[in-house]
Amino acid sequence: MIQKTQHDQKDGIPATLEAFECLINCEQPYRYELTQYDLRTRSGIITDMTGSSWAHAQLITRALVQFELQLQSGPCSVITGQHVSIPEHPTCIPDVVITCDVGDRNQSGLCKIRSPLLVIEVLSPSTERYDRTEKFQRYQHCPSLEVYILVSQQKRSIEVYRRNCDWKQEVYESGVIRLDVLDLELDIEQLYQGVLP
């Protein structure tokens, strides 16, 4: 049994990539990620990513609803809480992911998204550094990923990184963010309504 730890990157259980993959394939009730991953030794620290603040959960739900309403009639799906496969790296669990690959929907057993198109991470004090550095670097190895979004839960601030702009940071504090890759929009006022004053 894996001991549940806090999100603090210093805590966790050292493990190889193979041991980590075995753990997540057993469909444990926790959301684990292999952090501090060393590509050379193929090992890192198993970290439990469960639990979040009310604001964190609300921001995820509001983003899901906005995208779901826009994607209803197409081949794409917006989901949360599922592992994303990354070539030569451990899987990650984004807060929100959009995939348009029907193969991602037609899996039996544990769902692993192989073709993420858009990923959203809601920043938490305990995971912000990881989301901005190691996790972002991993996601860039997904050939299908076009947009990476970081959402602050402390203030109205959304960072958008786009592959076609060499992953340069764009910061938005109000208005509607246009995501041309899927002809989507993210309304910042709707996202933060009732979450922040």
Image (tube, rainbow, N blue to C red):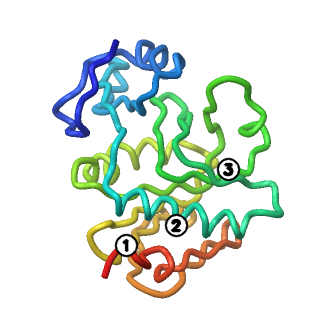
Task: Report the front residue among 117 and 65.
Answer: 65
Residue 195, numbered circle: 1
- Percent coordinates x, y for residue 101 in the rendering: 75, 45
- When the figure is inspected, residue 26 is found, relative to residue 162, above or below; the finding is above
Question: Residue 151 falls in which quadrant of the image?
Answer: bottom left
For image coordinates 34% across by 21% down, the residue present is 40
Q: Residues within 10 Å of mark 1 (few under 14, many from 20)?
A: some
Q: Residues within 10 Å of mark 3 (few under 14, many from 20)?
A: many
CA–CA distance in space, label 2 to label 1: 10 Å
For image coordinates 70% across by 68% down, the residue present is 69
> Callout 3, which amino acid?
Thr
In the displayed structure image, the side of residue 146 where residue 135 appears, left or right = left
Residues at circles 3 and 1 in contact by the CB criterion of under 8 Å: no
In the displayed structure image, the side of residue 110 where residue 57 appears, left or right = left
- When the figure is inspected, residue 51 is found, relative to residue 43, above or below; the finding is below
- Percent coordinates x, y for residue 120 in the rendering: 48, 57
> Callout 2, which amino acid?
Arg
Residue 99, numbered circle: 3
Q: Secondary structure at mark 2?
A: helix
Question: Residue 152 falls in which quadrant of the image?
Answer: bottom left
For image coordinates 62% across by 38% down, the residue present is 113
CA–CA distance in space, label 3 to label 1: 27 Å
Work out whether mark 3 precedes mark 1 in sequence or the reverse, and give the earlier one. Answer: 3
Residue 62, numbered circle: 2
- Percent coordinates x, y for residue 21 in the rendering: 48, 19
Residues at circles 2 and 1 in contact by the CB criterion of under 8 Å: yes
For image coordinates 23% across by 48% down, the residue present is 126
Q: Which quarter shows the N terminus?
A: top left
